[in-house]
């Protein structure tokens, strides 16, 4: 095609336009849920890293709730969310054990 030539646009059917709207809506919901999960996990990891174990224990249910919601809405696979939960629990227990030693 020569430069500056008009590009032909194929007319879109109603079903295609509806699919585009549905995809945009689902993308927004999935992005919001994924962001909530990442924020909760990052917050919990930050609390563990700084040694604020009391606050970290209070943040655990929030993180687990966000992960469970992501499973329910199929943003994350169940095994992935369970792996995150397991690693967070291990990190809290390790930090707690380290705090008791010192």
Image (spheres, rainbow, N blue to C red):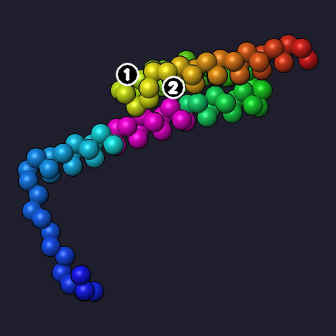
Q: Mark 1 and mark 2: span between their CA atoms?
A: 13 Å
**Relative vertical location of residue 94 with respect to residue 38 in this rendering, above or below:** above
Check residue 72 in the rendering and tell me which mark sits there, or answer none: 1
The secondary structure that dominates the magenta segment is: helix
Check residue 80 in the rendering and tell me which mark sits there, or answer none: 2
**Relative vertical location of residue 80 with respect to residue 8 in this rendering, above or below:** above
Residue 84 vs residue 10, the one in the foreground: 10
Whether residue 34 is visible: yes
**Relative vertical location of residue 19 with respect to residue 59 in this rendering, above or below:** below
Residue 45: x %, y % from top left: 67, 30
Q: Residue furthest front?
A: 1
- Label 1 vs 2, first from the N-terminus: 1
Q: Residue furthest bottom?
A: 3
State the image quarter where residue 2 is shown. Answer: bottom left
Residue 26 vs residue 79, the one in the foreground: 79
Residue at the spot 64% in from the left edge and 22% down from the top edge: 88
Whether residue 58 is visible: no
Residue 7 vs residue 59, the one in the foreground: 7
Quarter of the rendering occupied by the C terminus: top right
Tell me the element at label 1. Answer: helix
- Give the magenta range: 28-39
Say few, some or many: other residues with alpha carbon within 10 Å of mark 2 (under 14 / 14 to 19 / 20 or more): few
Residue 33: x %, y % from top left: 42, 34
Quarter of the rendering occupied by the N terminus: bottom left
Residue 37: x %, y % from top left: 50, 32
């Amino acid at each position: 095609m020569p430069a500056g030539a008009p590009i032909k646009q194929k007319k879109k059917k109603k079903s295609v336009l509806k699919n585009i709207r549905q995809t945009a809506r689902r993308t927004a919901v999935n992005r919001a849920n994924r962001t909530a999960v990442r924020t909760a996990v990052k917050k919990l990891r930050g609390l563990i890293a700084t040694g604020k174990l009391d606050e970290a224990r209070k943040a655990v249910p929030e993180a687990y709730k966000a992960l469970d919601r992501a499973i329910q809405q199929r943003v994350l696979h169940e095994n992935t969310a369970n792996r995150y939960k397991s690693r967070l629990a291990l990190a809290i227990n390790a930090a707690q054990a380290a705090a008791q030693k010192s």
